[in-house]
Amino acid sequence: MTEISHGSKISWRPSFDFPFLFPVVLVALVLRLVVMAFLYTEQLDPARDHWKFAYETGRIARSLATGRGFSSPLFADTGPTAFLTPVYPAIIAVIFKLFGVYSKASAFVILILQALISSLTSVPVFFFARKSFGDRVAYWSAWAWAVFPYGVYFSVERIWSTWLSTLLLSILFLMALSMNGGTRIWGWIGFGALFGITALTDPVVISVLPFLLVWMSYRLNRQGANWVRLSGVAMLALIACVCPWFIRNYRVFHQFVPFRDTMGMELLIGNNGNTSHWRPEEIGPWHNIEDWDEFKQLGELAYMARDKRWAMTFITTHPGRFLVTTVRRMVYLWTGFWSFNPRYLSQEPLDVPNIFFSTSFTLLTFIGLWRAFRDHSIDAALYAAVLLSFPLVYYVTHVEVYYRRQIDPMMVVLAVYAIVTMTGKRVETGERQKQELEPVHQM
């Protein structure tokens, strides 16, 4: 890093991005691999036919690797499934084919891959922080992500699609900030196609799409560009990307199943009257033998439809309890607090320190967002839209401790911005605003 003075303004600018970012990614990877060395054995537990090895993702990956197609997400051969979207099970299936199904070698390869993916997220974090708030915030944001406790721990604690979708959403966020009316149409096609791939990795990211497109279209309109044409092209590319999966589901299930078929079950998990834990284990086919028997008897889609009926019945007959539980879920996602009941804390002994960290992190994030609006950063609205829209589906269904991780990179940048501005450091946001107001010529 070099420090360059421009009058009274101090700019922290790396001479080259690669020499700066390489050690950041390397340190991030080393930290994650060290933690992995203590946690990898959790994937190798042979109980319930290696269930903890990637859970439903591992089951579907095994089916793919053994030639049975995209099927059987649980504990028996139950046929074709839409329990998950295809991208991550397909990646795990390739690793299973190369290194063995549920093998120690596969566990190492997958966890190292997840650690690398999480570490590489430092790169888009650096670039979108620099675009929004200048070099100093970008510098500290990249390092903050490298050592960020949630990023270090969760990326190697569980084999799941979260960290790939986190990286992809961070790249999409950077693209949204970077796109303008002078961008070639192929950039918009790439944006739409990447969003489609991200949605097929983790459909929850679709919740932010309308807000990204509205914000990008607003910028284009201010610059006099053809926002209808460009945003339309992006949507067509997204649709083209996800259509094969939709067609597959229609041919298999003879009804429209857009991404996953599990919404009814997700609703029932969080809306059944039991709020002793954010994830009551007796709901669903994983731990309840009666539910598992009904899953096999009814079939996947009928089982999900039944759960949806039960959940909607509970919600409509207990609107007050649904509202209270929704508020509790909101509080949990932003603070980590669910209950101080001793029985609950015996199941979640790390909740108390996590509440302190999660709440502090959230407060810094929203201080940074407020300061960004106060400083008239044009990007503040995009950060706000992503933060407020992404968790909406979890508020009404149920929460998990690793949910909301996909927007942690944006939160890290805002938290760093809060700290930098509270320490009295001047941050350069004016240059970007001037650029936003300049008309561009469409290419």
Image (cartoon, rainbow, N blue to C red):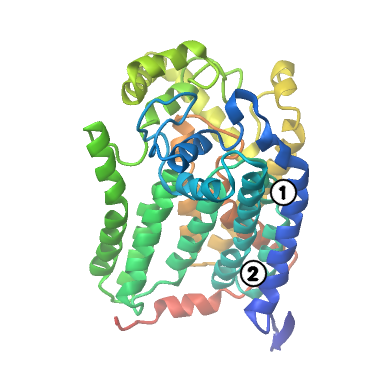
Numbered-mark total: 2
Q: Of the residues shown, which amino acid type is indicated by label 2?
A: Ala
- 353 w.r.t. 310: above or below: below
Tell me the quadrant of the picture where the N terminus can be found. bottom right
Residue 251 in the image, given as x and y percentages of width and height: 23, 38
Residue 263 disc label: none
Front disc: 2 or 1: 1
Residue 248 visible in the current orientation: yes
Image position, residue 22 (x, y; %): 68, 72
Badge 2 crowding class, 10 Å Cα cut-off, few under 14, some 14 to 19, many 20 or more, is many
SS at badge 1: helix
Q: Residue 136 or 249: which is nearer the viewer?
A: 249
* Quadrant of the image occupied by residue 435: bottom left
Amino acid on which the number 1 mark rests in the picture = Pro
Side of 168 relative to 349 (left or right): left
C-alpha distance separating marks 2 and 1? 19 Å
Q: Residues within 10 Å of mark 1 (few under 14, many from 20)?
A: some
Mark 1, residue position = 149
Q: Is residue 389 visible?
A: no
Name the secondary structure under disc 2.
helix
Q: Nearer the viewer, residue 170 or 243?
A: 243
Residue 47: image quadrant is top right
Could you tell me residue 336's position as x and y percent? 65, 35
Q: Earlier in the sequence, mark 2 or mark 1?
A: 2
Q: Which mark is residue 138?
A: 2
Q: Is residue 309 left or right of residue 19?
A: left
Q: Position of residue 118 (x, y in %)?
A: 62, 55
